[in-house]
Image (cartoon, rainbow, N blue to C red):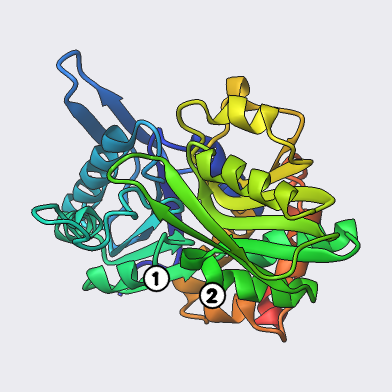
Amino acid sequence: MYADQFEIYTGNANRGLAEKICRYLGMDLGRLEVFQFSNENIFVKILDNVREKDVFIVQPTSHPVNESIMELLIMIDAFKRASAGRITAVVPYYAYGRSDKKDQPRVPISARLIADMITVAGADRVLTMDLHQGQIQGFFNIPVDELTAVHLLSNYFKQKQIEDPVVVTDLGFAKRARTFAELLDAPLAIIEKRRVGNSDRAELLNVIGEVRGRRAIIVDDEIDTAGTLTQIVGALEREGVTEIYACATHGVLSGSSIERIRDANVREVVMTDSIPLPPEKQLAKIKSLSVAPLIGEAIRRIHRGESVGALFSSEVSFTQDLLLWDSQNEPDALGSQGSPDADNAA
């Protein structure tokens, strides 16, 4: 259907992640120009021949959100018109994910709109990570592969060997948090909360589960303003938790989030690099783990027609080796092609 080789391209949303993915796979990033004219119109020019090739476009829809979305759509259209064999939109962070239903009169379902735009632009499939809600996959009429960072994050805390841990999450992330808790062999506690109107503020209602005297690990899909995080920290302190950690797949970190994290009584906040962490938002207590090996291995498997779900099978130890990957090392740091014996694992 398309040429044997595959190519990886990126816009301006998270070039660093795309470069790490290419470093892991032992290949060069494709040549592409993406910039704005003075009138804010976005221009894209592909500098390689991509006819009949398998193309992967790495572009999280993160800050600036609307600009990143337009870059993605225009890049997809450019590759479609350049006769690419197959176009996969690699969207590690999917914006507008909270707008996945009509929970008020006369409001849009923006997550569906974004899915429609990506499809109409010409994408043949989507590769993403930890959507706000799993049903967003159903908004697409093209194949969607949803990766998760739960195994990567849980293995990080497993190596820390925290005594008497309890995993804490809200109802929306409870299913994946249960997997997180099982991997740590820890109990699960649920935070009951509700969002107030259309504001970013959530009202904490109750802590369901036994947490007193334990060390809590708060887990969620994203940390945005960190308002909910600080409320949960306060509630856990009142319940007698001795030590608090937090982790999330996506570090949106908008508004006063950095100040809130700095002042919160949380020992460490662990996130992935699905969204870039600028220097002004880097704190000693914020730890970033790279998802480049996970996305890179998924890209390799999609291209070869192999199972992506096998990455999270109990029979595959690949996710346990991700923490060993150093983005500063050569591509063959974990094997002859930069992966931990991926072919045998498949």
Does dot 1 land on a helix, a strand or a loop? helix
Q: Nearer the viewer, residue 197 or 314?
A: 197
Q: Residue at x 69, y 59 (%)?
A: 153
Q: Is residue 338 visible?
A: no
Q: CA gap, disc 1 to disc 2? A: 10 Å
Q: In this view, does 296 lie to the left or right of 123?
A: right
Q: Name the residue under label 2.
A: 175
**At which x and y percent is residue 15?**
49, 36
**At which x and y percent is residue 274?**
53, 47
Q: Which residue lies furthest to the top in this view?
A: 38
Classify 287 as above or below 332. Answer: above
Q: Which of 6 and 297 is in front in this view?
A: 297
Q: Residues within 10 Å of mark 1 (few under 14, many from 20)?
A: few
Q: Residue at x 77, y 68 (%)?
A: 320
Classify 119 as above or below 346. Answer: above
Locate the C terminus by quadrant.
bottom right
**At which x and y percent is residue 220?**
56, 56
Q: Residue at x 55, y 36 (%)?
A: 16
Q: Is residue 264 left or right of residue 105?
A: right
Q: Mark 1 points at which residue?
A: 134
Q: Which residue is drawn at 79% across and 54% down?
A: 241
Type of amino acid under label 1:
Gly
Q: Nearer the viewer, residue 263 or 50?
A: 263
